[in-house]
Image (cartoon, rainbow, N blue to C red):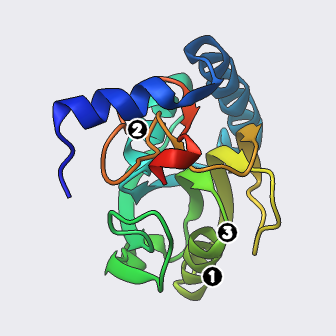
């Protein structure tokens, strides 16, 4: 479903800013420091979880000043909706993972289903180690935990810095909660 310009502006106007761009930049710097401590010298393979992980990866990689390689995987539960379903694997780089130290980068830890399945898949595919990092974690129970978290926010429907609302708003800088009337 496409949003027209008026509806797009109305949704943005009703949203609550939970994390400002400055707070997000500070969180990314903290994440980079932790990841550098844990991965420098390991020549990790960084796996961007498509599609929300694109923005996170783009913001975080220039802050990582150590040797690394980049690939992606595509596991999706939402597919443009506001509630998750069954995991669909669109691309799983099994051969590239074998024997590698893996860093999984994703946008949000919501229920933890996708991250749990991605980590399991990396282990099944023979990863030497797996470290996970998410830009945003919702304060709620999760099926698994991320090793590194940028910011923690209330359990609301979010958009911005990679997170989307009906396939829109990934490019908003900061993290915003969608108003209840827009859900």
Q: Earlier in the sequence, mark 3 or mark 2?
A: 2
Residue pictured at 51% horizontal, 37% vertical:
67
* Residue on which disc 2 sits: 55
Q: Is residue 20 above or below residue 33?
A: above
Could you say whether the residue bearing mark 1 is in a helix, strand or loop?
Answer: helix
Could you say whether the residue bearing mark 3 is in a helix, strand or loop?
Answer: loop
- Give the image location of residue 65, x and y in percent: 55, 25
Q: Is residue 28 above or below residue 75?
A: above
In the picture, measured across the screen, residue 20 lies left or right of residue 13, that is right
| Location of residue 117 by image quarter | bottom right
Could you say whether the residue bearing mark 2 is in a helix, strand or loop?
Answer: helix
In the picture, measured across the screen, residue 32 lies left or right of residue 158, that is right
Q: 154 or 40, which is in the foreground? A: 154
* Residue on which disc 1 sits: 120
Classed neighbour count for the residue bearing mark 1: other residues with Cα under 10 Å, few (<14), some (14–19), many (≥20): few
* Residue on which disc 3 sits: 112
Q: Earlier in the sequence, mark 2 or mark 1?
A: 2
Residue pictured at 55% horizontal, 32% vertical:
176
Q: How far apart are labels 3 and 1 at the CA level? A: 12 Å
- Give the image location of residue 183, x and y in percent: 49, 54
Can residue 123 be seen in the rendering of this structure?
A: yes
Q: How far apart are labels 2 and 1 at the CA level? A: 23 Å
Q: Residue extending furthest top?
A: 22
Q: Is residue 77 above or below residue 49?
A: below
Q: Is residue 124 above or below residue 26?
A: below
Q: Which one is in front in this view, the residue at disc 2 or the one at disc 1?
A: 2
Q: Residue extending furthest front?
A: 181
Residue pictured at 34% horizontal, 69% vertical:
79
| Location of residue 49 by image quarter | bottom left
Can residue 64 be seen in the rendering of this structure?
A: no
Callout count: 3
- Give the image location of residue 47, x and y in percent: 46, 57
């Amino acid at each position: 479903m496409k949003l027209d310009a008026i509806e797009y502006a109305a949704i943005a106007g009703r949203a609550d800013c939970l994390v400002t761009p400055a707070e997000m930049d500070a969180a990314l710097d903290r994440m980079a420091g932790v990841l550098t401590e844990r991965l420098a010298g390991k020549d990790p393979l960084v796996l961007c979880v498509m599609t929300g992980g694109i923005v996170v990866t783009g913001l975080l990689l220039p802050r990582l000043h150590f040797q690394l390689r980049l690939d992606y995987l595509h596991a999706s539960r939402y597919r443009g909706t506001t509630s998750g379903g069954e995991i669909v694997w669109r691309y799983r780089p099994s051969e590239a993972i074998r024997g590698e130290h893996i860093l999984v980068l994703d946008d949000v830890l919501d229920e933890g289903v996708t991250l749990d399945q991605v980590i399991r898949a990396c282990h099944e595919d023979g990863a030497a180690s797996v470290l996970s990092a998410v830009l945003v974690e919702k304060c709620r129970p999760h099926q698994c935990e991320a090793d590194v978290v940028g910011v923690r926010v209330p359990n609301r429907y979010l958009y911005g810095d990679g997170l989307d609302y009906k396939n829109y708003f990934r490019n908003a800088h900061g993290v915003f909660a969608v108003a209840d009337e827009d859900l």
